[in-house]
Amino acid sequence: MASFILQDIVKVSSLICPSKASDPGLSVEAITANHLFRGVGSAMMPSTLGGSVDQNLGLLRVNPVDSLGTGGRLLVLLHGFGADENDLAPIVQHIDPDGRFASVCFRAPIDLMPFGAAWYERNSEGVIDAQTFKSSVIAIGATIDDVCERGGFDRAEMVLLGFSQGCAMALAAGLSKETAVRPAALACLSGMLQEIPDFEYDFATLPATFVQHGTQDPMVDVERGRHIRDVLVASGHSPDYSEYPMGHEISAASLFDLRDWLAAI
């Protein structure tokens, strides 16, 4: 009954390799695992329809990991199903140790019971509700515009990162045919590319794109990460794609690669 929801559940883990633990860019406390039970709890629900959506397409709740100044560049992080705007905050100090970016985490607009949030709804058969998907894309864009205006950031220099369901939203918000100003780069972690009726992607031009996935992911099969890669390659692009012997998580090795990629953007 809940199998269609399991594919979107976020699990952020602290699988730190002993050989890497001494790396100055990462500590044993690099990533928290406190959302493991949150994801499992959410999976027990038959659908996400019990949540509420901001029908007015207002701005999303924002967690400013770093204080917003008038300089620097913007890094926007989008969490997965059942998590919230605090979920990805702990990785920021490790993927951007030099503080080149002002980092903000957005909260998805659909509140789940008893906690957490989602970017779109599904019906009892697992079919994505196109309206909530599109509404979230619009809300992400509007919130990015608001943060850029208040903080003095250039949207074209922004990096958009998403994990799991947040990855689907990063791709949609960054590559929508309606997106006037694209981000400088996209980071797609353990996620998928969702094909939604009447929603068009534009793959003609592509920001620098980083895709990583676990070969042992039980929630979002690695084939979905490969599908992202294959679609982009078929469109004439060369995304940075990597696989890791991990589940639905961010491992130490994947975190190091993400850090190195971001440093070159």
Image (cartoon, rainbow, N blue to C red):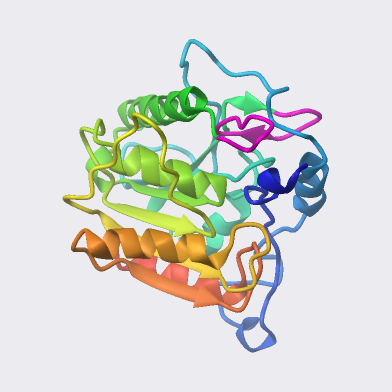
Q: How many marks?
A: 0
Q: Nearer the viewer, residue 95 or 183?
A: 183
Residue 71, percent from left and from top = 30, 42
Is the residue 172 above or below the residue 7 in the image?
above
Is the residue 216 above or below the residue 82 in the image?
below
Residue lying at the far bottom in this picture: please name it.
Answer: 19
In the image: residue 38, left or right of residue 77: right
Q: Is residue 76 visible?
A: no
- Point 32% across, 46% down: residue: 158
Q: Give the residues drawn in magenta, as a range.
A: 112-127
- Point 73% across, 22% down: residue: 50
In the image: residue 125, left or right of residue 196: right
Quadrant position of the N terminus in the picture: top right
In the image: residue 213, left or right of residue 227: right
For residue 113: magenta? yes
Q: Is residue 58 visible?
A: yes
Quadrant position of the C terminus in the picture: bottom left
Within the image, what quadrant is residue 170 found in? top left
Residue lying at the far top in this picture: please name it.
Answer: 56
For residue 217: magenta? no
Is the residue 24 above or below the residue 80 in the image?
below
- Point 25% across, 54% down: residue: 207
Residue lying at the far front in this picture: please name it.
Answer: 125
Residue 121, percent from left and from top = 60, 30
Residue 9, percent from left and from top = 67, 48
Q: State the predominant SS element of the stretch in magenta.
A: loop
Within the image, what quadrant is residue 241 found in? bottom left
Is the residue 82 above or below the residue 178 in the image?
below
- Point 62% across, 71% down: residue: 251
